[in-house]
Amino acid sequence: MSPLDKKKPALELGGNNAFIVLDDANVDQAVSASCFGKFMHQGQICIAINRIIVDKTIYEPFIERFKEKASQIKVGNPAESDTVIGPLINQKQVDRILSLIDQSVSEGANLIQKGKVNGKVMEPHILTDVSNDMAIAQNEVFGPVAVIIPVDSEEEAIQVANDTPFGLSGAVHSGSIERGIKVAKQIQTGMIHVNDQPINVEPNVPFGGEKFSGLGRYCGEWALDEFTTVKWVSVQNKPRQYPFS
């Protein structure tokens, strides 16, 4: 194959998205955002939350309110307008997720909410006291399983969020916008959202990841940049005097 036959690719390759809750965050807001960002479309979205990283000073109240909120989500027939969690894509995915849960429990995680599994429909499962080296934290779950990781500091939250080969999207919650932005800039992702959740796509903003999460950017002018090159065309409107001709 000659170089002329090769084309520049733009790839979106999934992620291991982190949702960081700092010690000064509004817990209720963080719970609401994380429930949406985790359970929307059963978690089967490339930019859905995979890991929820919470400062230990607010860890217990966060877990309590998150569990309460998750228990209110309607599960079942997706043809019903108020259903949030419907079936997973196939039985293989159900079995894969249940295997990840079992492995992580054997590694020391606590399964504080074990939802029912009816065929391919899984109710929310919640794992706490997860460490970032566990299987459930190192793999993109792609299902309705909340993985909650405690950390001691802002610095540890950043380190844990970045400790993955992937870097697609994420979110940071803080009572200070300035602090949230400061932390967001240190997270190695193509997209990140302060005091929101990561399931955000707009046609006029760049979409794409870092590291193993892909190449290039989609949407807006950035998509044009990926598949075009700049060419300079100049026009001399009147005769030009050259130094020696």
Image: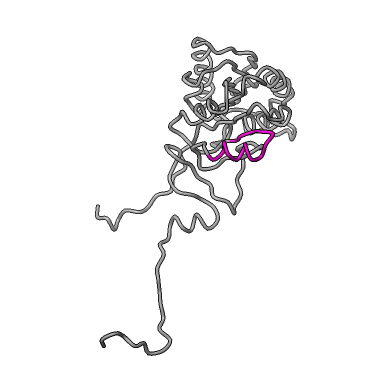
The single residue placed furthest to the bottom in the displayed view is: 239
Rendering colour mode: one colour
Magenta range is 171-185
Question: Would you say residue 208 sits in the magenta stretch?
Answer: no
Name the quadrant of the C terminus: bottom left
Closer to us: 166 or 203? 166
Closer to us: 182 or 203? 182
Closer to us: 110 or 81? 110
- Provide residue 22's location: percent of width, then percent of height: 63, 28
Above or below, 223 against 201 in this view is below
Is 229 on the left-hand or right-hand side of 188? left
Q: Residue at x 50, y 45 (%)?
A: 208
Q: Residue at x 54, y 32 (%)?
A: 17
Closer to us: 162 or 146? 162
Above or below, 79 against 221 in this view is above
Above or below, 91 against 196 in this view is above
Is 69 on the left-hand or right-hand side of 98? right
Q: Residue at x 68, y 26 (%)?
A: 76
Is 234 on the left-hand or right-hand side of 158? left
Question: Would you say residue 172 sits in the magenta stretch?
Answer: yes
Q: How many labels does the image show?
A: 0
- Provide residue 110's location: percent of width, then percent of height: 58, 12
- Provide residue 93's location: percent of width, then percent of height: 51, 25
